Amino acid sequence: MSINKLENRKDLEALFKWLNEPIYRYVYIRCGYNRELAEDITQDIFIKAWQKRLSFNPKKSTLKNWLYTITRNHIIDLYRKKKVDVKSFDEEIESGIKDESMSIDDELLLTDILKSLDKLKDRDKELLILRYIQDLDIEEISKIVGKSYNTTKVMIHRAIKKLKYIINK
Amino acid sequence: MEEKEIIENLNRFKPSPSKKWQEDTLDKLNSTVTESLDIRNSNTNLSNLLNSLMMKTKFKAIVTIATIATTLAIATGAVYASDPAKPGDFLYPVDKVAEQIRRTLTLDALNRAEFEMDVMDERVLELRNLSEGSNANQISNSISEVEAQKERLRVMLEEMTQLRARNKVQAEEQLQVMNKLASKIQSQEQVMNQVQTNLDESGDASNSGELDQVQNQYSEEMQNQIKNFEDNTGLKVNTNTQESEQNQGEDTQIQNQNQNQVSTGDENGGVQGVQNQNGSSGSNR
């Protein structure tokens, strides 16, 4: 279910029901694999989206891309104001991905992958999160990060190669 | 490990928020909307509202208005209509009455100023929606509504300043309101520019000229309010475009221990002069 306007309560509710999980997921990974912090930040983002609703222009962007951009900018703000620690999240990753549906081996494998992901440069990490965890297509990602389609595609391709190198090192 | 396996594993990683958080956040968002301007969709019990009004005799006139508005709304089944009414709609007078009630009930000056800013958002949004149609009379009325709201906002900001001078409002509290004002001015101007474009494209020179005048006055008056506040308090209002909705193509950079730079951009997808990995400048979108 997707919408492309944000003018009233119903729109906001629909937007939240549609995108709260992906936005939470993105925030969770980008802000240290901390559930409570991710929930707080995600809530702030939806409130911010409502407050900024006038800036949404359906002729220039989709509501989804617009919300992702707000999210991204908000996180960068938090980094800048040091409200989120920019550090390695190894311990948090280990405790953060406990999943009863996964086997121990799968959990360990995923832990390794996420720790390696965490070692990438922020831009590469973000691209891989958007592409392979958030399942956005390249066109959407290019609009969010402000690059051309081809540049984005190449950057994602290089990022996954770097990740593979780190994992297999 | 091959890329395919890495991608498959990343695909599987789908952390989710708790159901309780989702419910709590929906409630919080509902409150946020109610606090801003959507009294028509409020869950406020209207009879409780009227009862509390009845206790204060000086609100008899408001009770009368509310009764009429409620009667109208109930008769038309429209009080909980989901979409806000636009100027010219049958329900628009009901909206305006409800807004007036809310205005009268908001006694705190700071909250009132914020309320008027939010109502200004609504007026500007209404104007934008109308400008995409071709009813020149409705557009003209809407511009008048924007102008009237501009005046209300100006009066409220001046009242807040007077209260601050009498130590009834703290400068820091007013700073929060002024920061919000600075942010809203930028986004409202952006929308009014869109309206100008729509009017120019449709050849509506009369409304275009009228809006131009209102927009210039609004911008000037609000900038004066901000400047006077800064001069009198020594506090700096945040007009940073990263904080505001405008954010037209201005990149901001972040230093991270592991990386070079990540750029932010206009939420509608415009970024200028972005540095790519090789250090050369990208083109404008």
Image (cartoon, coloured by chain):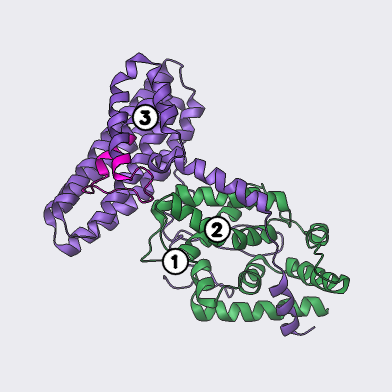
Count up the numbered dots: 3
Task: Judge by depth and name the residue closer to the eye, B242 or B27.
Answer: B27
Q: What residue is drawn where x is 38% and y is 41%?
A: B40
What amino acid does circle 2 point to? Lys
Does B31 sit above or below residue B209? above
Report how far apart the C-alphas of labels 2 and 1 lie in the structure: 16 Å
Residue B117 image label? none
Q: What residue is drawn where x is 56% and y is 61%?
A: A19
Report how far apart the C-alphas of labels 3 and 1 lie in the structure: 39 Å
Residue A62 image label? 1
Magenta region includes residue B84: yes
Point out residue A110 in the picture as x, y percentages from the top left corner.
79, 71
Is residue B14 toward the left or the right of residue A139 in the image? right
What amino acid does circle 3 point to? Asn
Which residue is the site of mark 3? B228
Chain A shade in the render: green
Point out residue B199 in the picture as x, y percentages from the top left corner.
19, 58
Pointers 2 and 1 within a single chain: yes
Q: What residue is drawn where x is 46% and y is 21%?
A: B169
What amino acid does circle 1 point to? Thr
Chain B shade in the render: purple
Question: Which residue range is magenta in the image?
Answer: B74-98
Question: Pointer 3: residues within 10 angstroms few (<14), some, or many (20+)?
Answer: few
Pointers 3 and 1 within a single chain: no
Report how far apart the C-alphas of labels 3 and 2 lie in the structure: 43 Å
Q: Chain of mark 1?
A: A
